[in-house]
Amino acid sequence: MTVIDEENASSTPRGPLSILFRSCSSDPKGSIHRAWSVTMLLTLLFFIVAIIEVGNLQSGDASFALIAAAVWTALIQFGMIIVGTFIIKRFSTSFSIGFLLGLVVIVAQQYLLLSVTFWKNQYGSSAKNVAFANLAFALFVLYTIFAATLMHFKESVMVAAVDAKGWRRSQQIAEEEI
């Protein structure tokens, strides 16, 4: 929701996200970078825990579906770290930021499903299953907060495609080949 002040010809965004992120508004790009850094660290921890959980499930005669879910999650985490960092640090066009937002929301939902699945899992060590589930739920919350932060400050990090790092160099190479 945007409030337009006709007398001063200015508009100020208002709404729940503006109130929530008021303290971050002085440095929106830095806030997104810090939020992504925290998310990456916890994701890296979850990657390690997912590998441990795969070993736990294999020793506990778990179904192939649970083992595949843990392996797939570990692979997705590694991919998220690479893709998210590349988009935020190097290629922040409107399309790539939108792609990252969608990816973050989908992975957040995956974390929620994993946490529900593994909280009451009876195969392997129940302590490891609960640790995996709790960390998955924490990442669900963290990814949701990161998505809200990125959604609120997306205009601050987006650049035009021609301003993206490396674009001019690839354009020069293409022109030289012609």
Image (cartoon, rainbow, N blue to C red):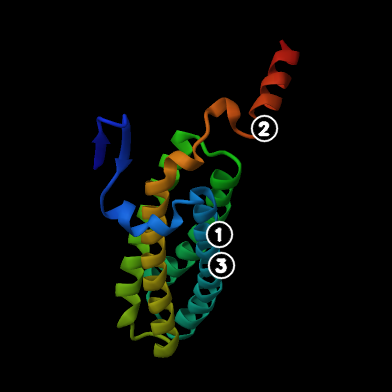
Q: Residue at x 57, y 51 (%)?
A: 85
Provide the residue designation for mark 3.
41
* Image depth: mark 3 or mark 1 in front: 3
Front in this rendered view, residue 27 or 147: 27
Q: Residue furthest top?
A: 178
Tell me where residue 126 sits by quadrant.
bottom left
104 sits to left or right of 178: left
Distance between the alpha carbons at the discs numbered 3 and 1: 11 Å
Compared to residue 124, the image places residue 102 above or below, namely above
Circle 3 Cα neighbour tier, 10 Å, few/some/many (<14 / 14–19 / ≥20) = few
Compared to residue 99, the image places residue 78 above or below, namely below
Per the image, label 3 sits on a secondary structure element best described as helix
Front in this rendered view, residue 37 or 14: 14
Per the image, label 2 sits on a secondary structure element best described as loop
Q: Residue furthest front?
A: 7
Which amino acid type is marked by label 1? Answer: Phe
The quarter of the image holding the N terminus is top left
Q: Position of residue 140 (x, y in %)?
A: 37, 66
